[in-house]
Amino acid sequence: MNRFVLSLATVFATVTLFSCGAQKQGTSSGNPGNGSSNTSAASGPSASEWKSAVKGTWTLNSIDRENLPSTFTIKSVFEEAPAECFVGSNWNFIGNGRGSITFNAQGTLCAPGASREIFWSIYNPGKGLGEPQFQFKKIYAGDKAKNVTTGYRLDLSYSDGNKLVMKMPLTVANGEAYLVFNFSRVN
């Protein structure tokens, strides 16, 4: 799998415009956290509206499974750690694309206090070619973001300024499923 096309098949599409942000809501219940989405390319927020909505510091409150069989096991998220190690982590998205993920969870395979430097942006597929997506790549000591060619891409689901939902598409035998990342704003 092409990692830059962001192998989200191994392991986050609705936003409400508030001052600089935008909203795209699911059609089945209107609850932005329910994981449903309306993905018509013409109706969603622009990449710049998403970038404004995403900037800031967020805490990952939960990772939900959508259409994912209970028997499906996910050993690692973003080739980093088990999903439970990400819950409670702080994600900092600075306007210049720099950012970090700081882990807080306790657990056998978790590293509380560890921080992963990232470079993030909003991928814009172009008019009529799909919805903007959140993308990031891990930056290791000595790396320059422009030289890192692998990363991850998540569907943007919802943001209202205080809540952010991103979905990671997964390919399973019975179709498409998602890991749903539910964030709340820290600042």
Image (cartoon, rainbow, N blue to C red):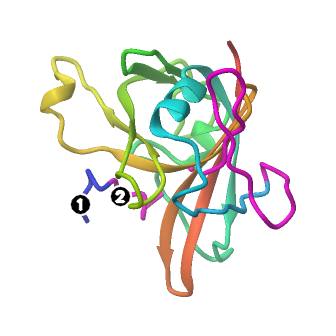
Front residue (pair 117, 28): 28
The residue drawn where x is 58% and y is 39% is: 85
Is 142 included in the stretch rendered in magenta?
no
The circle on residue 7 is 2
Marking on residue 2: 1
Label 2 neighbour load within 10 Å: few <14, some 14-19, many 20+ = many
Q: Where is residue 119 in the image (x, y as percent from the top left)?
A: 34, 27
Magenta stretch mostly in which secondary structure? Answer: loop
Q: In which quarter of the image is residue 66?
A: bottom right
- Is the residue under label 2 in contact with that under label 1 (CB below 8 Å)? yes
Residue 90 makes an appearance in the image: no
Which residue type does callout 2 highlight? Ser
Rounded to the nearest whole Å, what is the CA distance between mark 1 and mark 2? 6 Å
Q: What stretch is highlighted in magenta?
A: 6-33
Q: Is mark 2 on a helix, strand or loop?
A: loop
Q: In which quarter of the image is the N terminus?
A: bottom left
Q: Looking at the picture, does residue 150 appear above or below residue 60?
A: below
User: Is residue 61 shown above or below 52?
Assistant: below
Helix, strand or loop at disc 1? loop
- Asked if residue 29 lies in the magenta stretch, the reply is yes
Q: Classify mark 1: residues with Cα within 10 Å, few (<14), some (14-19) or many (20+).
A: few
Residue 15 percent location from the top left of the image: 67, 41
Query: Residue, x 70% and y 17% (percent of image)?
Result: 186
Percent x, y of residue 67: 67, 73
